[in-house]
Image (tube, rainbow, N blue to C red):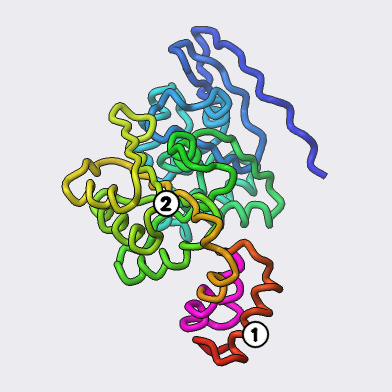
Amino acid sequence: MTAARAPFKVRRMAKDSKSARRYAPVGTPIEAPKAAAGLYLVATPIGNLADISLRALAVLAGCDVVACEDTRVTRKLTERYGVATPLTPYHEHNAAEARPKIMARLARGEAVALVSDAGTPLISDPGYKLVRAAQDAGYTVTAIPGASSVLTALNVAGLPTDRFFFEGFLPPKQAARQKRVAGLANIPATLVLFESGPRLADTLADLAEGLGPRAAAICRELTKLHEEIRRGDLAALARDYAQGGETRGEIVIVVAPPDETETQAADVDDMLRRALARVSLKDAVGEVALASGRSRREVYQRALELTKDGGDGAAR
């Protein structure tokens, strides 16, 4: 069993201290203790640098190295708060090469912080393979919570938050995007998606066609100077952005869940027929069970009845 860690103790530095493990949240340098060996997943601001936590600063300053997507982006944060910890790139394009080097550092007993360009690491960002490798090797992995564009968007969207489904980015090509939207149509939860500015209008049009007249919110540049929240139904929002609505910056789309009547038994049959026409029985059952909120056993029995009766789609 791994022993519990003592909490970080913050100490003000003497003016003549030469320690590199320090940070300055309000201009006065504070000494940070060396972090215990292990991997630290540190959430960083999604736009406003003031949203960093004191614990995150202490960990960044106390680690031996910070692995980050883009060193230029992370350096703006570390320089703002006087953190001198070395930075090393870790992103989807170099992960296979960089991961063994980080594992070697952990093997030497070092403390490694992992950050994304903005927000919570691993959420629509690389990193889970590193976390799994570290855990499999027996190293301690610690999350330092903080900003998340997903949760921030949910907070301000004005839509149900008791259950939500994070989709991330939809496929860039229309045919694949429409197919994925069809798979999301009956998930009984608020949907949260990311999208780029140039594709926003087209994506909203496909969402409107595939999901119907649902309420939605477009959350742009959250926590930044030009933060903007637009609300309306999907079709109206699609028209607004097609006509030149501002699309610069980071964008989160939040879409209301379907009405309860949309996932009744007749709809489950229809969902099964459509799913069976393109995937195996097993995959169709899993997809419809997730979308409808019904048990896999119930959906499986209904799928067998439909295929026996010669319904659309054959079991494969």
Q: Is residue 238 visible?
A: yes
Q: Is residue 115 visible?
A: no
Residue lying farthest to the left in this orientation: 243
Question: Which quadrant is the C terminus positioned in?
Answer: bottom right
Task: Name the residue rendered at 47%, 83% in the picture.
Answer: 277
Residue lying farthest to the right in this orientation: 1
Question: Between 291 and 48, which is closer to the camera in this rendering?
Answer: 291
- Identity of the amino acid at label 2? Leu
Q: Secondary structure at mark 2?
A: strand
**Which of the two marks, 2 or 1, is nearer to us in this view?**
1
Residue 203 x %, y %: 31, 57
In magenta stretch: residue 217: no
The residue that mark 1 highlights is 304
Tell me where the magenta segment starts and ends, as one range: 271-290
| Res. 169 image quadrant | bottom left
The answer to the question of whether label 2 and label 1 lie on touching residues, with beta carbons closer than 8 A, is no
Task: Name the residue rendered at 60%, 75% in the picture.
Answer: 285
Residue 24 x %, y %: 47, 17
Task: Name the residue rendered at 26%, 55% in the picture.
Answer: 199
Question: Between 123 and 247, which is closer to the camera in this rendering?
Answer: 247
The residue that mark 2 highlights is 193
Q: Secondary structure at mark 1?
A: helix
Task: Name the residue rendered at 32%, 61% in the picture.
Answer: 206
Question: Which quadrant is the N terminus positioned in?
Answer: top right
* Category of crowding for the residue at label 2, using alpha-carbon neighbours closer than 10 angstroms: few (below 14), some (14–19), many (at least 20): some
